[in-house]
Image: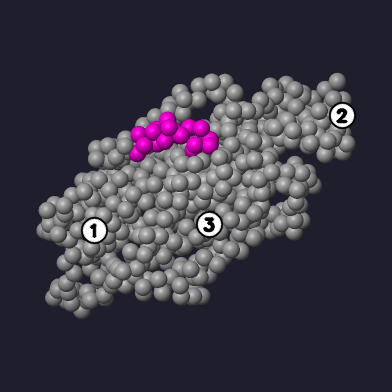
Amino acid sequence: MVYETSYGSGLKPFTPDLNRGKWEKPTDYMFACFGLALKLDVFVASYWFFFDMGLFGMMPYYVYMVIYLVPIMVIHSFMGQFSSSGFISAFRLSPFFKGMGYVSFFLTIAMLIYYSIFAAVPLLFMVNSFRPTLPWSCEGLKSWYNDSSGQSTVCNITTTAEDLASMENDTYYFGKILHVPSVLYFQNHFDSIREESFPDLTEDYELSWHFVGLFVVVWALIAIIFYKFSETAKFGKLIRYMVIGTLALLLVCFVRFLFLPGAILGLKKFMTPRAEDIAMGIPATFVMVLHAFGAGWGSVIALSSFNGFKTNIMSYSWIISFGQIFIYIMFGMVSFMLDRYYNELNEGSFNSHVMAHWLLFLSSASALASMDWPNLWTFIYYFMLLMAALIVMATQIFTLLQSLFDEFEQLRAKKQEVTFGLIGGLAVCSFFFCTNHGITFFSALGLDAIFSHSLLHLLLLLVVLWIYGRERFQRDIEFMLGQPFASWKIFILRFIAPFILVICLLSGIGLSLMEHSYSSVIVLVMSILLVALPILAIPGYGFYYLYQSTGTFCERFKRTCRPTDWYPVEMEHRQQYEEAVGNTEMTHQLFEVTEEVN
């Protein structure tokens, strides 16, 4: 045996889970990663960053793909595929930094407790789409909306004498605000939001029992998925069909939206090159890139661990990156068409502005209500959004569970109890987001990912390319895939990508501080508990591992940074790996460790 084991540090060696399973088809890994791009809060939480940048503004994304997205995705995939381990145990590569895996665990939890909003909202519109008259149509609005509230809607766009007088007498007049019926319908489930229309931190907490019921249904669907499809092969097959079905329905809805008034003009605006789009796209597409690795950062590591040992992760990483940007472009085009549709409605009105909140999730319902067969199209569109949300939630829970089972051997005998205990705990915690504060200020948790993911990427580059070493990394990649990892990519990752990540890290800290200053106290506490404090696990676990080791501080530190139990799980590949590196540095390292222990 030519690799180091945990015995040198006094810890129990890693025991692989030989029953964890593999994907039924190699492409299931790709579809699971495509599903990570369906995390659509990137459009909601980042509205002001890139919602209006168009196709030309997406160009920096392709530069980022070459500079660091695809190379870092290869590193993530390498760690999972080589070790057949989730995002915690994969850090046997350098045990001192295993705390990064625990940070990824808590980041995933932080996302899961709020993301049920994005499944509950589509479910709300789906359930009510069975009514003969849609409540958010202009006709249905009359049955529950009070016109005397003073809020004008797109259903009664007029130019009044008061509007003209206001323009003549007040140079600071910004025009009349027009509300979208489907947004008002959503807000009607919360008394405080219905009365104020804007978030107010001074309001008392108000629980919507309608949304509690919807959240229960969402988590029940998640529980059914894991009850029926807990095995890796079955789960991968389910996600494959769900992703294909979601994208097929998205294309169908896209074609139908083309016939909305103004939709073609919206597409033209999306396609038209504008210089300012590049300036907007440089920081904005970076947010998209960060979401490529999943809500908890380590999702790709866990998903790739179910690959066959020789799966070509290099070509798959390129396909995944192009597939994810295709999804963003499709939803971006739908957003532009909806935005232009409401501008067309408002075009004949004098100096007014349509408040089209959450275009993809809320305002879209009123646009669908204006079509022929509105009930059918509403159901199809929101069923697509519901499937997208379930894909994201189920995939994140799947990676989280498998990472726990890989790291803690004693949990493997209680998989069902752990699975449904986790789902139940997440469901209970998510009920906070059924309140007026939770459903309004959840985006602060989403923005925290900008700085947390940037920090973890920086540390990953440090661990893999500096501590483990670029030569070892390139050797392992070539052994696994039979093809080299280009040195120019290593150079970019070591010396260029860190500068971009540092800028993004600092920007993320600023954005998080700004967002939390306007957010709910409970959301701030959640952010501290699930994002800020877990980062301390990185040095915390490292020093704990130092304490478990023997020798002087320098000897302990060197030992804890070396790869431990780092080998392919399958015996055939492990023996080949020993033969490939047995006569070089690995034997030398083992000899050094033996001397130190003696």
Compute the Cα span from label 3 to label 1: 30 Å
Circles 3 and 2: CB atoms closer than 8 Å: no
Disc 2 element = helix
- Dot 3 or dot 1, earlier in sequence: 3
Name the spot of residue 543 as percent of width and height, x first.
Answer: 67, 30
Q: Nearer the viewer, residue 246 or 177?
A: 246
Disc 1 element = helix
Looking at numbered disc 3 in the image, what kind of residue is underneath it? Gly
Please state which of the two labelled residues, at mark 3 or mark 2, is closer to the viewer. Answer: 3
In the figure, 398 relative to 488: above or below?
A: above
- Dot 2 or dot 1, earlier in sequence: 1
Q: Which residue is mark 3?
A: 323
Name the spot of residue 589 as percent of width and height, x first.
Answer: 84, 33
Which portion, as a residue range, is magenta?
218-235
In the figure, 530 relative to 482: above or below?
A: above
Left or right relative to 559: residue 539: left
What residue is rendered at 70% in x and 32% in y?
570
Q: Which residue is mark 1?
A: 374
